[in-house]
Structure formats: structure tokens, C-alpha cells
Amino acid sequence: MFPEIIDTRPWRRAIDDSLNWVVRNWGDEFEAAAYPLLMLLNFIEDVLIATPWWLIMAILVGIAWLATRRWQLPVIVLVSLLFLGIMELWEDAMTTMALMIAATITAIIFSIPLGVWMSRSARVRQVVTPLLDLMQTMPSFVYLIPTVMIFGPGKIPALIATIVYAAPPLVRLTDLGLRSVDPAVMEASRAFGTTPSQRLFGVQIPLSLPTILAGVNQTTMMALAMVVIASMIGAGGLGYQVLQGIGRLEVSRGLFAGLGIVVLAIVFDRITQSFGKQLQAKIGLAETR
Amino acid sequence: MNEIKLDTDLAIRMRGVTKIFGDDPQSALELLRAGKTKTEVQAETNHVVGLDNVSLDIARGQIFVVMGLSGSGKSTLIRHVNRLIEPTAGEIIVDGTDVLKMSLEELRAYRRNSVAMVFQKFGLLPHRSVIDNVAYGLEVRGVPRAERLEKAAKWIDTVGLSGYEQSRPRQLSGGQQQRVGLARALALDTDIILMDEAFSALDPLIRSGMQDQLIELQKTLGKTILFITHDFDEALKIADRIAVLKDGAVQQEGKPEDIVLKPANEHIEEFVREVNKARAIHVRTIMERGEFEACEFTVPETARCEDVLPYFAEHQWVGVTNEQGTQIGRVTAKRVIGALARYTPGVNEG
């Protein structure tokens, strides 16, 4: 046994007590602060559920066509969505999609500026990188419980947990993308008397868009990976079906809902990847054929 | 009086420009000032001396070539003129203003309006079309879209890339890409153009074509061009004046012929040995000036030694004429041979 050097109990108690204090005194404020997130999520969910299924199918197939200009991906998307409909998973799928989209949008809003800041300052990178590591490796239940304590079970803690888990790759890839822009191009831009913001928006961001889009792709995938855990605290959707399947020992229910998540993942992964490839070809970073 | 006139004719004046790369350049600078060599400073402080007390006067309207091997500091030198690199010590006066004293805002304005640059690796924006690349500098300067596209189209035409306006840089060959780079710099219509090994990445034939195009353009533009190269032949072909750089220090500075005919040291002589001297030396620098009886054959004063060689099979003298066609001197085979022979102090002087 490792010898007890100091008594850690007071520390634990201090942490627990301070959390309780925060919940008691600041619970309402936190909830108010997170309210816009809830609005965003509810809005997306309402829109997705109110939109007729065929329109959503048409839109996604259309996007798939725009992303590739070939018939293969639209067909895959169509089949995937038909599967969701036939398996009576449509509404749950829309709820899950809403959670994923809301998490991705929020992650984009926070991650890209953070990535930009990291790419410009080695010190910021030094501080942020371990935080990102922590966000990705810390078991989500560890921060799920305090968020549930603060916000109460429901969609907000589910969304927050999803964002915490899904945002880091986008931050990292934004930082990487911006820093790996060809230094010769950056120097040329500097030589023409550009301001830092002209370089950022005119050169760096356009040239690193494929990498940033790869980050968005990663974020959507990780958000989908969180849906089962999110449903445990009241997010609903496909994850809840999986959870029920486990609870009732209904293998079929769990399997179909699980496949539903896979199908959603495939649809969004392929679409964002194709957009990334298209963009790469456009700015001439793709390998020459 | 003479001094003042000289100053206004200067486009760029560098005085004691020194650049030391490292964490603590000032202490390394002291060592360097105390007379240590580049190697000693590097061994003692682990600081690299990029430029060592470089002073150059670059006159308006000249093509001034800085020649040196890789690591000689020539790319560092050119980047000081628009302050892409900050020197450790020294001053750089462009059009009477000390570039190093400019604020960030002034520096940006200076880069937008007074110096344009062409890069070895082109530095084109891959996500923009050719015409938008050429118009880039003007866009940064704030020129309205219609006007800058019109100017860009004109320069694309001048460098011979008409029809490629909407192409992406990657769809062009290396030579074409560098033409875009050249057009982008020329479109800014600055007095000074910096060219950093602009043609070094190109195939020899394309390179030669670009050199000819530059000389041709310069005839009408009369810009001050600071041109960096590692290629002595290129330097001799385009330069009005050449400075040879080694280990960050200027070894010799002068007209191309001066350097070929009287290399200042062993290092420069090595370059000179490799070049085709008959092409490097103009007849006007070796001719006997004065009035002689008219020669049967004459060449213009811009001719080079290789142009007169064929005549010596039959004739003893070849006349040299000026632009008006009047004979202003003559060359003999002996003079040509004297110039082409390896320079040995005391042997063929005078």
C-alpha cells in the first residue's frame, strides 16, 4: 500500500462543498447563461421535426450531390435516410441530429476563434493544449454529474457534455491548419503590406479551410459518439432508444437504434469529407492527377 | 554639391547593416565588432551572423544584382529592404526615409506603395485566379475592383499570359507562375522592385527568356531593381552593377566588367573562372578610344567580345560605333585576348 502522506479528505470536502455552494447560490444564473444554448437546440429540433420527412431527405440528398457531383453519395444518403424512416426511428433521429447540429454550431463558434488565437501565440497554445487533452480524456461522467447538479437533468447538461467532448479536435485542427499555411505565401502577403487581419481572412483561413473542415467533421462524429451518454441525462433521441433496449433487454431495439446512429454518422461524415475534398481541389492543395 | 546630387540619385542606401540570428544578438554583435570572424562568433555564442556590416548604394533606375552562394546572406539582405527581417544594427535609407524607424503603420504603407517583391518560390495565392493574384497588391492598397482588374489585365498581357486570367496558379508551369509573380509586382508600379532569386527555380531556357523579358521591360520602365541570384552568368547578363556577397559581407562591388576583369579576391576569381568571359565583357570597356581610320567592319559599343571574335580571323582591327553609328574606337585581337585571359596581377595591366 502506498503510505498516506497527507490527508486528502479536506480537499475532497472542499471541492464538494464549493460545488454545492455554487449550485445553491449560482444555479439560476448558470441556467440563465445556458439558456441561449437551449433555445438553439430547441429551435433546431422543432424545425427538423416540423419539416416533412421527404423535404429533409431531398435537402440532404441535394447537399450530398453538391458535395460530390456524382450519384454514389446521394444514393447512399437516400438509402440511409430511408432506413431510418422504415425502422420507425425518424423522429428520434431528428432529435439526435438536432443535438449534434447544435453542439457542432456551438463548437464552431467557440473553437475557431480559440484555434486562431492558439496559432498566433505559443503561450496560449501551451495553456490550451493540456486543457484540450483533459477534455478529450476525462471520462464524461466526471463532468456530467456536476453539470447535472448545476443545470438539473435535461437537454442543457447533455448539450454541454457533448460540446466539451466534441470541440477539441476542431480547436486543434484550426490551429494546425492556420500554422501550416505555406510560409512562402504568408511572406509574400506580408511583403505587400497586408495587415494581420487581411492575412488571416484573405490568406490563412481560406488556405486552411480544408483542415478546419476536417475538424468540423471530427466534431460531428464525436458529437454522435456522445448521444447515448447524453440520453442518460435527458437528451432523448436515438440514444434513449439504445438505453431502453439495454434496460429492457430488447436486443433488437438497441441494435436498430444503434444502427440508426451509425447511419447518421455515415451521412454526415461523407458529406463533410466530400466538401473538404472539393475545397482542397479548388484551392489547389490536392495532389495533381 | 556633388554629394547632395549623389544622394538624391540613390534609391536605396544601406549603412553598416548587420544581422545576427539568435536569442541575444547584441552580445554577439559586440564580439563581431571586436573583430571576431563569423565562424568564431558562431562557435562562441551559437549565434549565426547573417549579414556583417553591409553598406551599399543603389542608384535609381539600376538593376543592382547581389550575387552569392547559398548561405552568403543574400536573401537576408534583400528582406531588409522591406523589413521582412529586422536588422541587428545599421540603417537603410529609401528615398530619404529610414526604413528601420518606421512605425508598423508606416511600414505597411511603405510596403504597399514603394517596394514590390518577386519571390523564388513565387508566393502566389493558390486559391485565387491569376488576375486576382496580379491585382492582389492593388487590392491591399485599396484600389477599387474595376480599376485594379483593368491594371492587372494590362500587366498580364505585358508578361505574355493573356488568356490565363481565370486560371489557378497550379494550372500554370513554373515559368508562367513566375510571370504572374512578376506581373503582380509590376502592377503596383513602385519605384523599387525586389527580386529574390526570381528566376532560380526555372529551367535554363525559360530562365534565359525571363531574363530577356526583364531587360526588355526595364528599358521602358526604368525601375530600381534589386536582384538576388547565385548565378554569376545571370548577374552578368542583367546587371548594371554587381555586389558579391560571401559570409554576409560584401566582397566586391562594381560594374560587371570590373568584376570579371579585376576580381578582388580568390573567391570571386573562382566565379569568374566559370563564366564565359567572352559574353560577359563588352567591347566598349576594352576598346581603344579615339579617332582611327575607319575600319572595314564595325560593331556597336553594346557588343560583347564573343561578337567580334569571328572578325579577327581576317582582320586586325574591328571598329566600335556608338548609337548614332559613328566610330568611336576600335578593338584589336590582342586586347580581346588580354581581357579573356585569366587575370594575373602585373602581367596584362595597362
Image (cartoon, coloured by chain):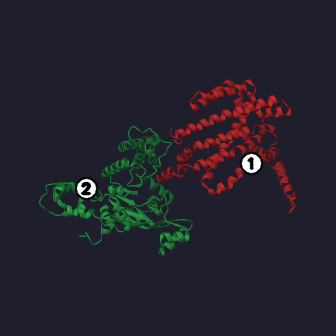
- Residue located farthest toward the bottom when viewing the structure as drawn: B34
Which is more toward the observer, B150 or A266?
Answer: A266
Asked where in the image residue A280 lies, by quadrant, the reply is: top right
Helix, strand or loop status at disc 1: helix
SS label for mark 2: helix
Vertical placement of residue A80 versus A234, above or below: above
Q: Which residue is more in the foreground, B210 or A115?
A: B210
Q: Is there any visible trace of residue B26 in the rendered image? A: no
Chain B's shade in the image? green
Q: Amino acid at mark 2?
A: Glu
Q: Are marks 1 and 2 on the same chain?
A: no
Q: Quadrant of the N terminus of chain A?
A: bottom right
Q: Which residue is mark 2?
A: B306
- The residue lying at 44 percent from left, 43 percent from top is B144
Q: According to the image, label 1 marks what residue? A: A137
Mark 2 closeness class: few <14, some 14–19, many ≥20 residues within 10 Å: some
Q: Are marks 1 and 2 in contact (CB under 8 Å)?
A: no
Q: What residue is at 77 percent from the left and 44 percent from the top?
A: A31
